[in-house]
Amino acid sequence: MNAVLDTAIWFAQACFAIATALAAIRVIQGPAAQDRVLAFDTMYINGMLSLLMLGMRSSSSAYFDMALLIALFGFAGSVALAKFLLRGEVIEP
């Protein structure tokens, strides 16, 4: 791997780690539930992107599969939280 790409991947991973930490702070002390849901969305997207960067750095396809699973579960969790905030229940009777 070339040195410029390696440096860019390290920089991107550092940026994603900082963004995840800031989103975790928003999850803990968010003033409203909607802010916490958006911070949760940000956290799973940053986690997915961090795994993609790790997969690019190590040239392993296992990280890409894990990133896909995080994206699927994160989307399902976001939909469930949004539905809960909108209606007060996730599963309708």
Image: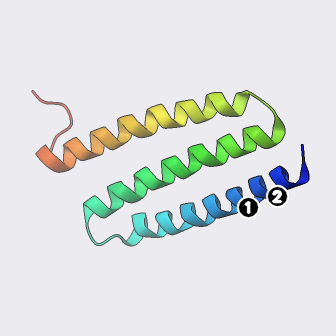
Quadrant of the drawing holding the C terminus: top left
What residue is rendered at 61% in x and 66% in y?
18
* Nearest the eye: 19 or 92: 19
At 34% across and 43% down in the image, what residue appears? Answer: 78
Identity of the residue drawn at 55% across and 64% down: 19
Give 55 or 35, whichever is nearer the viewer.
55
Count the labels in the image. 2
Disc 1 residue crowd, few under 14, some 14–19, many 20+, Cα 10 Å: few
- How many residues crowd around disc 2 within 10 Å: few (fewer than 14), some, or many (20 or more)? few
Query: Disc 1 residue type?
Result: Phe
In this picture, residue 86 sits left or right of residue 36: left
C-alpha distance separating marks 2 and 1 = 6 Å
What's the colour scheme?
Answer: rainbow
Quadrant position of the N terminus in the picture: top right
Between 75 and 89, the residue placed more toward the observer is 75
**Residue that sits furthest to the left in the current view:** 93
Query: Image point 72% across, 28% down: which residue?
Result: 62
Rendered image: mark on residue 87? none
Dot 1 falls on a residue whose secondary structure is helix
Pointer 2 with pointer 1, Cβ within 8 A? yes
Q: Is residue 86 left or right of residue 55?
A: left
* Residue labelled with disc 2: 7
Residue 75: which quarter of the image?
A: top left
Residue 93 sits above or below residue 47 on the image? above
Disc 2 on helix, strand or loop? Answer: helix
Instruction: Check disc 2 and give the amino acid type.
Output: Thr
Residue designated by label 1: 11
Please provide percent x and percent y for residue 59: 81, 34
